Image: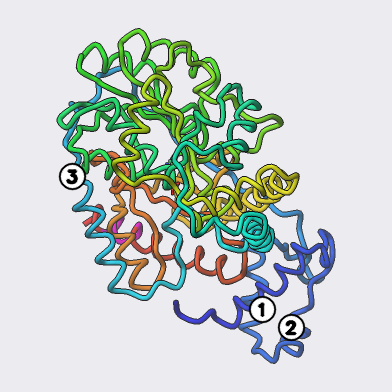
Amino acid sequence: MPSTPRYRQIAEHYLQAIRADALQPGDRLPSLRELMQLHGVSLSTALQVCRTLESEGWAEARERSGYFVTRPRRLKIVPMDEPATDRAPDPAQFVGIHEKVSAFVTQRRAHAVHLNLSTARGAPALYPAEAMRNAVTRALRQHPELLTQATPSRERTPFREAVAQRAVRVGMALSPEEVLPTHGCIEALNLALRAVAQPGDTVAVESPTFYGLLQVLETLGMRALEIPTSPQTGLSIEALELAIAAYRDIKAVVVVPHLQNPLGSVMPDAHKARLAALCEQHGMALIEDDTYSELLDAPAPARALKSFDRSGNIIHCASLHKVLAPGLRLGWINAGRWQARVEMLKYAQSRSNEALAQWAAGGFMASGGYDRHLKQLRASLRTQRERTAEAITQHFPPGTRLNLPPGGLQLWVELPRQLSSVAVFDAALREHILVAPGTLFSNTTRCDHYVRINCGLPWTPALEAGLRRLGEIVCAQYAAGAVRAAA
Ligand SMILES: Cc1ncc(COP(=O)(O)O)c(C=O)c1O
């Protein structure tokens, strides 16, 4: 990234003071002369500092008195439209996502990345490194054989016990033996899909959806039927009903009911009940991906979709990757009536998960420290999302829209329609900023003018400067597009 200009550095200094309440609304900022002396800058730089603070809503000029701190202007976030749900979706497609992901990875590897806004992952600082280190040491002290003795796949580990116990809070009744540990949620999804469908079968997915799921479907030779999904309430049940009427061969439905990736939508309980009943009625397996529900800001934990299961038709998949330990590939699955088949597939695919991770994570999950960590993580992410949304609203061109989700690690940003997320991705990468282009989240061209921005990084002046630079890049493309349109 180019170095930050001097006026911006000085403006940042005052912004930090305002945010820390050292300078409060109504306080006078240093005069132009004072700024020149204090920071050793010219009159025009001092003036630029004040104008920057003024244009960003942090200061106001009063005639003959100088600049004063104002009450921060709450920037208006323009929400996205709901998707059209009155037509049957395009027919299911064989996926073809590998090509797009390969292009993305090849491009990314050709550049040094200084600011990675493309992942859906928290920074290491957000996770309890010391507590987890202690949990590993304690597990090994109590069970010195953990690394040298094979783990029987049916063994009742502290991890299985902790998952079963926490499941009660969200309306599920599972015994520890019914919780099958997996290598992340991605293995759980893989197993679930293999248990309920065959190559060539059609699987309904949310649109947009995270590209990891599209990759799994492609690997398994299955077709994805993209169902319109609301940025507020998740998968449209009406659209799914239309799809069922139009295409009678849907084998399974995969949904992320809480904090869907990339939308951040949360499915209301009434929709969960309707979806569970609809899938049951039409003989479609329902796969719940519960990767993010612990990151939801809500007075009480959200009810799992699986809690609406009446016949073993719902498969529940989740993991600790986003919520406790990105370095552990520890997930789990309860596969309802397909449990025995999934256990067999897991055994054939990767045998059982390592015992040490299960003893350490399970030990920590059973302590009060886990809930304290989750509370802190949610609070940090809330600040980071709000700050990121504020920066986008401030620096991106008119016509940009986004929804501020009630939790999670990312923002899904709709750019003005004429912009291409791939062009934004290319231009940003040339300046060492990585974003995830919307093209990765659908087989259609519907998401080509969206980008997904990670909010998992702690808020710093460097991050703020990076988002501002990204905004300038998008604005430059917007201006060029406007010129093209006028020519
Ligand atoms: C919705 C969703 N499900 C599953 C995964 C993969 O989870 P894991 O890393 O636990 O395999 C991701 C990762 O981004 C995700 O966003």
Which of 280 and 224 lies nearest the eye of the viewer?
280
Q: Position of residue 289 (x, y in %)?
A: 44, 34
Q: Helix, strand or loop at disc 2?
A: helix
Q: Is mark 1 within 8 Å of ligand 1?
A: no
- For label 3, being within 8 Å of ligand 1 is answered no
Which circle's residue, 3 or 2, is located before the other in the chain?
A: 2
From mark 1 to mark 2, how far is it between C-alphas? 9 Å
Residue 10 — which label? 1
Q: Is residue 92 magenta?
A: no
Q: Are marks 3 and 1 in contact (CB under 8 Å)?
A: no
Q: Are marks 1 and 2 in contact (CB under 8 Å)?
A: yes
Quadrant location of the N terminus in the rendered image:
bottom left
Numbered label attached to residue 96: 3
Q: What is the secondary structure assignment of the residue under circle 1?
A: helix
Residue at image location 24% in from the left, 11% down from the top = 245
* Segment tinted magenta in the rendering: 478-483
Q: Quadrant of the C terminus?
A: bottom left
Q: Is mark 2 within 8 Å of ligand 1?
A: no
| Contact between labelled residues 2 and 3, with CB atoms less than 8 Å apart | no
Q: Amino acid at mark 3?
A: Gly
Toward which corner of the image does residue 145 lie, by quadrant? bottom right
Q: Nearer the viewer, mark 1 or mark 2?
A: 1
Where residue 4 sits in the image (x, y, percent)? 54, 79
Residue 130 lies left or right of residue 24; in this view the side is left
Q: Which residue is mark 2?
A: 35
Dot 3 falls on a residue whose secondary structure is loop
Residue 148 percent coordinates (x, y): 49, 59
